[in-house]
Amino acid sequence: MEKLPIALYIIPSLIMFCCGVYGFITRKNMIAILISLELMLNSVDINFVVFNRFLYPGQLEGMMFTLFAIAIAAAETALAIAIIVNIFRAVKNIDIRDLNKMKF
Amino acid sequence: MDYSQFLVMHQEIGLLVLILLIFLFDTFSSRQVPRGLSMFSVCLFGLLTVGGFVFPWDKAVASAFGGMYVTSPVMVAIKNVLNVGVFIVLLQSMNWADGEFMRIRRGEFYELLLITLFGMYLMISARHFLLFIIGLETASLPLAALVAFDKNRYESHEAAVKYILTAVFSSAIFMMGLSFVYALAGTLYFNDIAGACFGGDAMLIVAVAFVIAGFGFKLSLVPFHLWTADVYQGAPTAVTSYLSVISKGAAAFSFFVVMVQVFGPFYGKIWEWMLYALIILTITVGNLFALRQKNLKRFLAFSSISQAGYIMLGVISGSAQGLGSLIFYILVYIFSNLAAFGVISSIENKTGRVDMDSYNNLYSTNPRLAFTMMLAMFSLAGIPPFAGFFSKFFIFSAAVQPGTPALYILTLIALINTIISLYYYLLVVKAMFIKNQEECVIPAFRSTGSERLGMWICVAGIIFVGLFSCIYNSLISAAQMNTEYIFTLFAN
Amino acid sequence: MIFSNILIYFVVIPLVMLGGLFLCRNMNQIRTVAVIGSTALLALSVYLMFDFLQLRAAGADDIMLYQGSWMWFEPLNIHLAVGVDGISVAMILLSAIIVFAGTFASWKITPLPKDFFLWLILLSTGVFGFFISIDLFTMFMFYEVALIPMYLLIGLWGTGRKEYSAMKLTLMLMGGSAFLLLGILGIYYHSAPEGGRLTMNLLEISANDAIDHNWQYFLFPITFVGFGVLGAMFPFHTWSPDGHASAPTAVSMLHAGVLMKLGGYGCFRVAIYLMPFAANELSWIFLILTGISVVYGAFSACVQTDLKYINAYSSVSHCGLVLFAILMLNNTAMTGAVMQMLSHGLMTALFFALIGMIYGRTHTRDIRQMGGLMKIMPFLAVCYVIAGMASLGLPGLSGFVAEMTIFVGSFQNSDFFHRAFTIVACSSIVITAVYILRVVGKLLFGPVQDEHHLQLTDATWWERFSTITLIVCVAGIGCFPNWIAGLLHDSFIPIIEVLTK
Amino acid sequence: MESVGSIVMYSIIVAAIIIFSILTVTTRRILRAATYLLFTLFATAGLYFMLDYEFLGAVQIAVYAGGIVVLVVFSILLTSKPGDTSSKLTSKKRVVGLAASVASLAVLGYAIASRCDFWSTFVKPSETGFDMHLLGSMLLGTGKYQYLLPFEAVSVLLLACIIGGVVIARKR
Amino acid sequence: MSIFILCIPLFMFLFLGLVGMKLSHKLTGFLGCLGMGACLTLCYITSFTYFFGGDFVNEAGERIQSILWNTTWLQFTDHLVIRLGFLLDPISAMMLVVIPTISFMVHVYSLGYMEGEKGFQRYYAFLSLFSFSMLGLVVATNIFQMYIFWELVGASSYLLIGFFYKLPSAVSASKKAFIVTRFADLGFLVGILILSYYTKTFNFLDMTSNPEGVFGSFEGATFMGASVLTWALVLIFMGGMGKSAMLPLHIWLPDAMEGPTPVSALIHAATMVVAGVYLVARLFPLYLLEEAALTIITVVGCLTAFYAAVVACAQVDIKRVLAFSTISQIAFMITSLGVARPEIHEGLGYMASMFHLFTHAMFKALLFLGAGALIHAVHSNNYTAMGGLRKYMPVTHVTFLIGCLAIAGIWPFAGFFSKDEILSAAYGNHWFWGLWLSMVAGLTAFYMFRLYYLIFWWKNPDFGHHTPHDPPLAMKFPLIFLAAVSCVAGFIPFGHLVTWNREPYTIHIDPVVAASSLGIAIVAILLATYMYRKENPLPDKLANTFHGLWTAAHHRFYWDELYLWITHKVIFNSICKPIAWFDRHIIDGTMDGFARVTQWASCSIRGLQSGNVQTYVWIYLIGALLMATVTWLCLL
């Protein structure tokens, strides 16, 4: 483990983040978008943990941040799913492309 | 473990108690009683607002939880300002909240609204990014629920989806930026970050850019603003007005704090120029979009985008004067924008119309509403003797205070943009007053008492807040007190 | 105590009028309030003038008299500071006269008379406030207060392409004031030497003389352009023809008569007085522009067919002469400039009043569709000829005095450039004669063009009152110019001192 | 030999993270996407374990994998008929998405990779022993580096989200 | 006392102008004549006191220039002050005789001529205004006062020409008069500016009492090859050219005949049009400093004299003939000033010019008033409607004949003496000028007698039931009075009264010049008699023979057409219209263009707000990344 520098941990996390971005932009299903968002949030969590562990092991701020971030992510997801379910009830469809009645 | 530290948080505690009381009242009172809950909430909140002013704000200086939470006169001031805004929003929404549709969700409306206010309090007082993020999310997530409140309207759903997805995305970006900050400074306490010496390499730039982007969402700075118009249009009017003034005001203040306290040492090097570009973009693009709008809510959305650009002039100045002017601007903006929203929601409740064309010749049927709207437009456009003039003047004077030519040019661009904004504000005035050959589709009616009270407060604010210099003077002196909580290491 | 200062009442009276108008319920009450208020203003300004002269005669040699200063916004050192010198007194008097005449000229305004007077009075509040202020902030504030009522006044009560004109006028003037605001801020932040207390007070800024020369190069042009837009300086004058053409009578009167003077007044009170170095260095640029406006406006007026357009372009020419004279930077020319402001204010107000009255009867302003009005409405026609004569500079009326003072003063500059441009400007008096006589000939003389016009009536008593007031003033200045010239001449001494330092 | 083991372990975890992340956003079946997300989250938890943050790893599995993914799966089942696959992506959309993700990867990756010390910083044995006691005092302490206030605040946030979720999702 | 000379007419103007409408015509006319009579008396007293009282002569025998009063009207700088004052010297004293005399005669004459006209009160008010302005002009103590009254006479001339404001021709004539003179006044004004800039004074006396001293320090100042003094003087003379209708600014005067005929007599024959001569005479010591300026004056005068005389031979309208004759005669005066030098007959030209001004005022007013009587009788301006009137209108006939003889320069009528002095002065300067003027004098005699014969002889027309007759007494009296003056004015010892250096000078009639000019005049009269005494085809034949010349002269050598072309085609169409177009389309278009560009920009970025949240996020992300990248690139 001593042979693996911090960059090798962060870069996969960044890849995960970018996958999330890709997913958000390309997926049509709103829940798929939500899943992509989870990837992004998760990648941030990894960052905090890794930075904490590698750079500043003296304090546990990064870890605590991750801990709270997980809670926040859960809350966000719950609310987002509620909204998506709600809209499914209203229009029987959760395709994000159809949600463009308001524009310009 | 000194739990007495909680007592420092007067306003937060008070607000939480208020939420609890509403919760209890909502749970145990009969839902059939008309107006009971809304009356109760508004009155209580009114008391809280007044209490905030009665409280000796210049004594309120404290740092608690190891520096995670601070309070100082200027923070009390901005919270009071927000309280005033929320109070007006509540007054104006009473009519809507008393409607049949809202009967079963009245309590939730007030609870969610006030919880977001609590989140904003936290944002304002937080001096640690974790607390700050929690405050930020508390201030934005429940709003998604509020945006989706109007279940019978499709637009409300669409707005809610756009809002929540963008909000989560932006918080992901924000937190990514924060993780870089953490990597560079090794701490999340504002003070310590400012103290930790880290170099200005690519990582720092990315970190600052992402943090600004995160704020950009809350403040609707261009190009992070695109959700704004759709959400404002789709959300219930009460929520829109709340979003446009309160949420923005709190974000602007905390943006100032973060930029100045955390990234202060990199002012001239990094974020001044980022902000510079953002301000120009925000003001210009906001104005350009507002030009064509026919839907008044959407119109005000774009107008509020460009107003955010003006508010940012206070941030770019980075001085105590800038901070004071920023708060003053927010206060005036609250009165002006809420006056406009008051008229819009009053008319929307009555007739369901929000398009500009139906306002043609409003003056003939509803002269008072038209007059209020006109005052609001003039104030937003910065016409003296209304408050908007003073706030614009002060924010501009703060912006050029550092005295660099670049800032003069920025101010000039902002000033030229005021002409465009004047154009579209006058369009509304023109519709109401000048198109007097056409028949007005809005019948003459009398607004409810609460709406009128709300509008009267706004009108009084528009007329007197600027003329009575004590308000601005005390805001500036508040901003100059206890500068260690904000201006720790600022270069200026 | 703030109310012990006489100048404050120039703002207080209009505000009280506003309050009074709010309570009015019918036309008679509205008229009563308007007449009482405007008479009070007129009386007060006449009193002020005599009192001022007396004080000066008694040896009060401050730059400004009746000074008062009350702290307003402490952090920026903004005061509500008032004070007047001879120039301001003259301008206040002019404003009061025109408001007075304007009140009578809009005796039968419809629709919404109450609102009309409300906005009109708000406008005059701004005008008076501007002239009594010696603090940049309050000055600017009143300046903008005076601008915005124009939008509604033109938009609601105007004629023709009123919406377009109102919008254009408002936006262009606000554009000017955007530059102005930046200039004021720049002046403020350089108003005191390093470490001194920054100030907005004109006199203090001038006394400090701390504005760096490089900054003057930047601040002078934007301030001058800012005020110049309102002074209808080429090429920022195009709001003027459309705006005047669409505005209702009293508004045209007030706007051309007083509001455009704010521009000229501001130019020397702010731009030149505070930044004398740049004024000396850069005046040639603006001299060219204003020189162009003088001739250009006159030429444009020659081919217009709409009465109001003719007068609007004539205003461009005459107001260009005001700025032109100011830029000559010597006492005589500047005195002439202010006299031209007074003269142009009165005679343009007279013109617009008459045009409004004629238009109110014939319902056209196209000179090709009218003729022989001298036979139909002799009173108005004679007044129109008098106004025209004043405009083309007939001795005995005010225009001559002002123009001659300007030309003689301008010609005292010792370099060829200034004198050559003076001659160019002089040539406008010929062109003025051309377009004035063209209108008079087509409109008033000759055969009656439209048979329907034969039934029209001559002026009513309030119209007579309004026009006679103005004519008396025009002739008064024209016949006895020296006292007012002396008043102004002395007031320019401090400004000239600063310029020659 | 421990290092070899950890390298292998690392490789597996990282490969899982990357592969499943990509699969999550590229698969056309929504339910599969949820499953791949679950794997990704598991892999992340593995990473936490590897970095000696066992508690965090447990939380990750419990909250994320156990809570969120289940919620997501339920909602998928609620909103889609089985066998639903999304139609193929248009190439334009893919290019746009790829551009954004590649650009962000480039920028973020450059920011990380350009720091020389990030290639020479290795994990050190943790100095502060992590135990539940410490965690408890951190969560309930009021001093510096203690998180009572965020803890309370996040509870308000969760409350708000519950209320919000309820009020939106209920049928009336 | 002298202040009343100005105040009475001014008061009459204000009084009649403001309350005249309430008064009857009779009362108005009476009041007008009374006022003018009072003024006349005062002027006579002043003038006679000056010339014969003896108080106004200094030890050296020079008449002194005396400022009776002088009040500050407008102060520009310490030196440059406009004062209103009363300067009494030989020429102003002389004008104080001429102006009120003619004016009073016109006042009286108008009682008959304007009887029953609408606007009678207005007419008298304007006459008073004109008298006031003209008197103010001649007594001016400084050049700016002169300019003020100069403008005022222009305005009152404008008002009086346009008196019949319902006639489009009168309106356009008045406009033309005003604008042409205004243009000339521009030159005057610029000249004043230049002059005052160098002399630091407006006062005549400061300028003329010591011209070399005042201008000594500026001799080096030149502009485009000429000294500034030349420029100033020529420009000032340009003002005089406008007022006195010198070529090429003469075009307004013939048209000005649209006004009532008494007005033409007063303003456009006797008084106002000689203001240019008066101006040059006033500044004569300055002109003496600049030979070039005097030469220009001479050339302009000679050309105009000849041109006007030729045109007068081909006019049909009797008032126009008289108008061109006026132009020609004024040109004589101008030339006379131009050729005057102290060393030539002790400055004879100056005296001759003033003398001619005086006599011309009398006989030209007489001629105009006579023409008025004719027009009054036959209701037409054209001689084609007249002929053989000598039987019907004997008084008019005789007085008109006296006028013609006077203008033709037949001894012993007034014109002979003054014209003779002019010719002497011209010959004294250069034989060419003398010859030229002699020829023009011959032409004068010819066209005047052509006119006389065409009106009073030529044919016996049939007037039908409406027989022309002599005018009423109010009109007859001025005719007789002026005829008498024309007979005797030549014997006034003018040289003792008015000279350039104000020293008395005895006129010697040069027998050669006198005889030759008399001879030329008689030959010309005989020629006219031969051609026009009886109706015969000779004139038509001649006109056909010299068809081109005749048509050109009849059309006044197309000066009006040239002016029309310049004003309409060049100024109006090529300057005014393009400027107006430029203003509407370029300047205004630019301002509208800003608005349009803004609108266009607004429309063109609307796609940004596509309504699709994925696009929003994409832009969001790219925005953030760009912000970082650009900043980083800038910091590199």
Image (tube, rainbow, N blue to C red):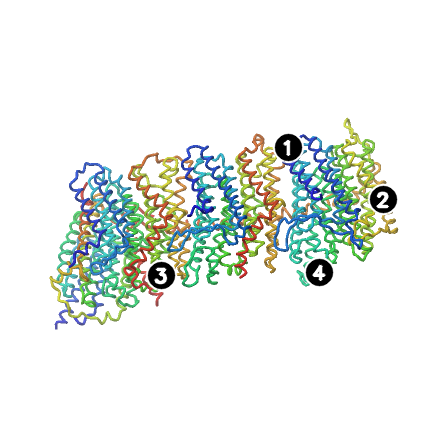
Considering every residue shown, the one lying at the far bottom of the view is D1
Of badges 1 and 2, nearer the viewer stands 1
Give whichever of discs 4 and 1 has the lower sequence position: 1
x, y percentage for residue B411? 40, 56
Q: Label 1, on which residue?
A: E21
State the CA–CA distance, disc 3 to disc 2: 98 Å
Disc marking residue B273: 3
State the CA–CA distance, disc 2 to disc 4: 45 Å
State the CA–CA distance, disc 4 to disc 1: 54 Å
Identify which residue is drawn at 17% across, 72% down. Answer: A2
User: From the viewer's perspective, is B183 left or right of E524?
Assistant: left
Tell which of E355 and E633 is nearer to you. E355
Mark 1: which amino acid? Met
x, y percentage for residue B71? 25, 56
Mark 4: which amino acid? Gly
Disc marking residue E410: 2
State the CA–CA distance, disc 3 to disc 1: 78 Å
Q: Label 4, on which residue?
A: E213
